[in-house]
Image (spheres, rainbow, N blue to C red):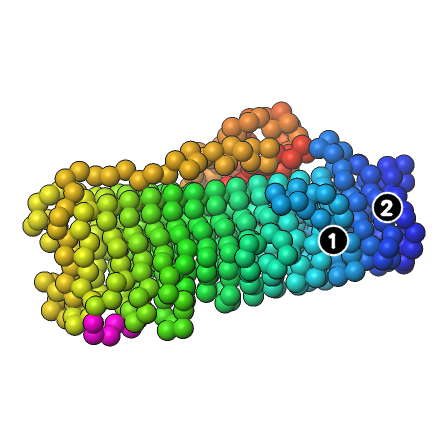
Amino acid sequence: MNGFISANTTWNLVGSPYIVNGNALLSNGNTLTIEPGVIVKFDNDKALQIDGKLIAVGTPLNRIIFTSNQAVPSAGDWGKIHFPDLCEDAVLDAQGNYLSGSIMKYCDVRYGGGLGFGEIHIEASTPYFSECRITQSSSSGFYSGTGDFSIDSSLISDCQDYGIYYLSYSLTSHDIFFRNDSILNNINGGIFLGSGGGSDPYYFRINKCTFLNNLNDGAISAPNYSHRNLLIEENHFESNENAITGTGFEKTSISCNHFIANTENVINLSNYSSSGSISHNIFNANSGTLSMIQIQNTQATLFIGRTYITDNVLTNNSYASCCLRYHPRMDNDQLIQIMNNNFENNNTPKIISIDNSNAPPGTYDFIKMKYNSFSNPLAQYELHNNIPYGSSNMTVDSNYWGTTVTAHIDSVIYDYFDFANQSVVYYQPILNSPIEANTNCIPFGSNVNENRNRLVLSSAFPNPFPESTTIRFAIGLQDATFMLFNSLGQNVKTENYKLVTEIHFSRKNLPDGIYFYSVIEQNGLMSSGKLIIR
């Protein structure tokens, strides 16, 4: 199969497998329909370009497979499926439901990415993806130049670059939806958002997704300016190296998420425009060398606005600096509101640290901090005020500090009375008992259960281990592939298992180190985790 596809064409099960032995191009105005159960194999570096409309819709039991034509496949064997600006865009309704246009559903795409633009390359187009598995790419799973596409209920895993890479995006005509996706084990990160903008009433919605074991840039990275109208809500972030990092966010909601056992920064927002919320989240057992949550406002040109950090539970986190660091610019009346949060049993020198970037003389309304509970015996300071004397003082009344004894409260607040070059913290009146943060927007773990048709919980014991361990699964495996990757993302072990509820794993000749495993079922169930051999 190669050359132009210049008429409406159907690839059916009778003709399967289809071998793409030269680059193939679907001409504009034509439709390529691929039926359930069809297998499409690609020779080295070969690609399929869609200038027309692609209808590739399988079923849960008869998925469409795009894969390598090598006898022993490996990442990067073939090129990509390319959707340029000539392809017929998908049309979605206001709720993100597919209506028409190019679609891939119940499709598996693996062992591609050899041309460096991902297994799926999207350029100025908006195809729709649902219930797909995009895995084992030598580059990214999805690479998008300027496409504003949506992904629903899909697995994007084990890519050697990013799971999803957006060079740029815009929100000028419709919402972008990432919903119920599992984004796992990607070497450079889960989702990378390059330059992006937004205009009301449109939003970039990342909702009810699971992020596990994404390294380097972590789960979601947005390092450039002009990110507006981002909703990161009801997701599960676990064991990522960084969770959310961004620059120049505006009108952003990071709410109702669970951040569990991530390393380094969980949320790091720089040049943040003070127009958004971090609310109703659970932060538990995260650790790192700096701060768990860091917000920096350093530019005088940023919009005046409000940041709301409310109704979060932060427990059992361990950081070398602090749990929450706020770095305001204090000459334009930006305000942060820290209210109704529980800080408990965190192991860090400072729970909240306020560090100025620009603190001119005068009084600026830059913080409102009430109705929080602090109980952190391993912390030196519950509140560390680094605003210089002569600038704004801080009033943080109506908080609970683990006791009503003022001598204890004085000892856990760092201010003028500890170092005369700092401003004063006023904390009276104080609460007599702790408050309870409201995280009832979603019960803990429910989004993982909703993803259970994609994600199966698993645990290994012992872990770390010297010779062997047992991996147990919450749901029995029917016909699954177990893959083990080292810290460089190299596949060092692959085995198949049928009708088991646990896997007995022996290190054999593997060296000490950190490893990540993925278990993928034929019916779409999957699991992922970390093993430490020591």
Judged by depth in the image, the label closer to the viewer, 1 or 2, is 1
Measuring from the top left, give residue 222's x and y in whole percent.
51, 61
Residue at 29% in and 45% down: 341
Magenta highlight range: 357-362
Please identify the quadrant where the C terminus is shown.
top left
Find out whether residue 359 is within the magenta segment: yes
Label whose residue precedes the other's in the sequence (1 or 2): 2
Residue at label 2? 18
Q: Is residue 307 left or right of residue 360?
A: right
State the separation of the CA atoms marked 1 and 2. Answer: 25 Å
Could you tell me the amino acid type at mark 2?
Tyr
- Res. 453 in view: yes
Q: Is residue 123 above or below residue 404?
A: below
Measuring from the top left, give residue 218's x and y in whole percent.
49, 55
Find out whether residue 529 is within the magenta segment: no
Measuring from the top left, give residue 256's x and y in whole percent.
43, 43
- Give the dominant element type of the magenta stretch: helix, strand or loop: loop
Residue at 13% in and 48% down: 429
Q: Is residue 228 left or right of residue 162?
A: left
Residue at label 1? 89
